[in-house]
Amino acid sequence: MSCPTNPAANTLAAGAIIAFASVWLRGSAVSALDFGSDEGRRDSTIAYTEGLRTYDNVKKYGAERVDDRDRQMFLPDGIRAGEYLVFPSLAAKAIYDDNIFAQPGRKTGDLSEELTPSVRLSSQFPNHILDMAVKARVVHFNEHSGLDYVDGSASVDGAFHFDHAHTLAASVLTSFEHDDRADPEAPKNAAEFVPLFHNRATLGLTRDAGRLYGTFSGTVESWRYQNVKAFDGSTINESARNLEVYTAEAKVGYRFSPGFEWQSKLRVLRNENSTAISQSNWGYEALSGLSLESNPLVRWHVLAGFALRDYDRTAFGTTSATLLEGRLQWLATQNMTVYVTGRRELASDVTASGKGRIDNTIKGRIEYEVLRNLVLTGTAGFIAAQYEGADRDDRSVVAGLGLQYFHTKNILLTADYEYLHRTSTMSEFNLDRNKYGIGVKIRF
């Protein structure tokens, strides 16, 4: 399929290329900071990592997030294998879900058990990274064995540092998963979980030129849904939800000073949905804004922009939306970190309306270190989903509690609770669900 002629889209694509080129051609490598919560990301340069010691006010003054606290004494040592540390683990968890079919009316509850073996290989090369992981999940329901399923995934993440200023990062994921019954697009009359194949590959190049930096990346991602049985015994054809997404993205930033940074993102997407009622489209997104500090303990990140979807199918026309991306990080005390995030986005997944979905989300998260080996987490959020071209609007309230107890280096105990309440203008999508879980993880 050919790209439709669109002056605004062509201007945006050209802007992405020019912005990246301006970063690539300037300056030599010096200390730098990509302000925000992106620490440890694979595409960061050596210059960025070294610059955190002087450019990151949080580290400069000795403050840290709960998630960053040193818990090495409670983490597994791993098994040495050449240039790798191998971390095998086995997790077992019991979950009670009071609405396993995610139905709006009468609830059906059941207790399930999950067994999750995994192996993670962490590279120990002096500069470069090549990590690998393999994971499986076996789920068994006590009273509804027809819902039993097995998931599996494998991933590779790598980063090649040409020098202090240049990093080539890549990641590959392949997985066999099962759809969450509470997903807004999941079929309501399915008698089982929908299986799907999910694959993703990303390649990106980062250039760090002192105060100025840029990343240019490309991603290919696909979801292939499998048919399932309905409650009445018929077969539900899920191929209409299949989606392939091709993305090219340029991210450019300029660091005015520690704690004050301008950032812009430009993205061009191709969404492929080759079905009888095709939702294939070209997508264009642009975001720009600031990351700053009120003080070393309070960080803000605010971006605003615009998104457009230009559909191949003439009847769908175009869908547009303003974009917002906000984040607050507050180190309230030495033992408590507070996060608030807000986002307005144009979803890429296939929707029943055919013209896309605009999601408005605000979520809060509190991490509290009760003891050095005992961490409590609380979350709450609100999601408003607006379906373009359809008489459907969803409003969802989500909340949760989680507890992690690092008993020893090799034993991690967990307990959690999740709550979801959704009301919709289409009553069949109403939902009220509570999930309770308790688990243990053996790590080496």
Image (cartoon, rainbow, N blue to C red):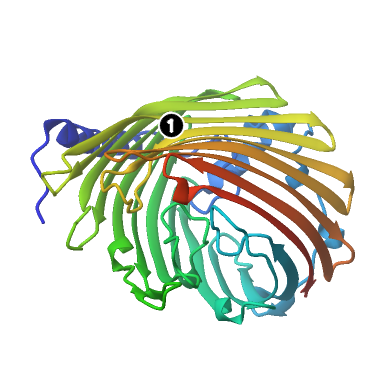
Horizontal and vertical percent for residue 176? 47, 74
**Helix, strand or loop at mark 1:** strand
| Residue shown at 40% from the left, 67% from the top | 199
Quadrant in which the C terminus is drawn: bottom right
Q: Quick check: 423 above or below 414?
A: above
Amino acid type of the residue that numbered disc 1 sits on in the rendered structure: Gly
| Residue shown at 82% from the left, 58% from the top | 72
Q: Mark 1 sits on what residue?
A: 253
Horizontal and vertical percent for residue 363? 60, 36
Q: Quick check: 272 above or below 408?
A: above
Horizontal and vertical percent for residue 374? 87, 52
- Where residue 150 sits, quadrant-wise, is bottom right
Q: Nearer the viewer, residue 237 or 123?
A: 237
Along the horizontal axis of the image, is 333 left or right of 205? right
Q: Quick check: 56 above or below 103?
A: above
Along the horizontal axis of the image, is 310 left or right of 266? left
Q: How many marks?
A: 1
Horizontal and vertical percent for residue 41? 55, 50
- Where residue 171 sits, quadrant-wise, is bottom left
Quadrant in which the N terminus is drawn: bottom left
Crowd rating for badge 1 (residues with CA inside 10 Å; few <14, some 14–19, many 20+): many
Along the horizontal axis of the image, is 109 left or right of 422? right
Q: Nearer the viewer, residue 161 or 20?
A: 20
